[in-house]
Image (spheres, helix red, strand yellow):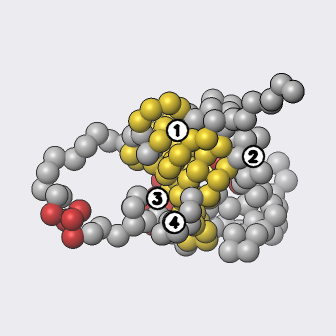
Amino acid sequence: MPVDSDASDEVEPTLDDVTERIPPAGGAPTADAAAVSDQPAGPEPKEETAADHPNLRIKTLVEGEGDALEKGQTAKVHYVGFLLDGTQFDGNVGRAEPFAVQNVGNARVIKGWNLGLIGMKKGEKRRLTIPPDLAYGATPRPKIPANSTLVFDVTLDEIVAAETPSKD
């Protein structure tokens, strides 16, 4: 097999090697969080993958309630995006207005979001670990190098039903 003479001998870190660099869900612990740290921990967050895209990792950090988000609906979310080294590149946490993802499943967002948001319930918080082929691929973006795996903590604030065409 031919060897790429420009290839580095450096081994690329795996996702598990760098997970500890990602800030914990919710950011830095607060005094309230420290006060309840002696209480028993809740259930371990569940992790799954999208059936058609096993490299998309979906981890439920906080369970939601009510109906699940379906394809075609609008999701209003608060989110923060990180690179695997823990560098934050985007987010709207702290803003009053959530980000509206219209027509989930076919929205004008990266494919990893279209796949990773479906099934969320109001109040649910998920960590989406999105491989480059479901994000920006080989195209660099401001603050995002080419071929980057992206990590998003996303909280679903509201589900807006898909509009049905009126019959005039």
The answer to whether mark 1 and mark 4 are in CB contact below 8 A is: no
Provide residue 94's location: percent of width, then percent of height: 48, 69
- Residue marked by disc 2: 107
Q: Is residue 24 left or right of residue 89?
A: left
Which sits earlier in the primary sequence, circle 1 or circle 4? 4
**In the picture shown, does residue 158 fall above or below 118?**
below
Foreground of the two, 166 or 28 = 166
- Residue marked by disc 3: 19
Compute the Cα span from label 1 to label 4: 21 Å
Provide residue 32's location: percent of width, then percent of height: 21, 65
Provide the secondary structure element on which disc 1 rests: loop
The residue sitting at 76% across, 69% down in the picture is 141
Residue 96 circle label: 4
The residue sitting at 71% across, 46% down in the picture is 102
| Amino acid under disc 1 | Met
The residue sitting at 77% across, 51% down in the picture is 108
Compute the Cα span from label 2 to label 1: 15 Å
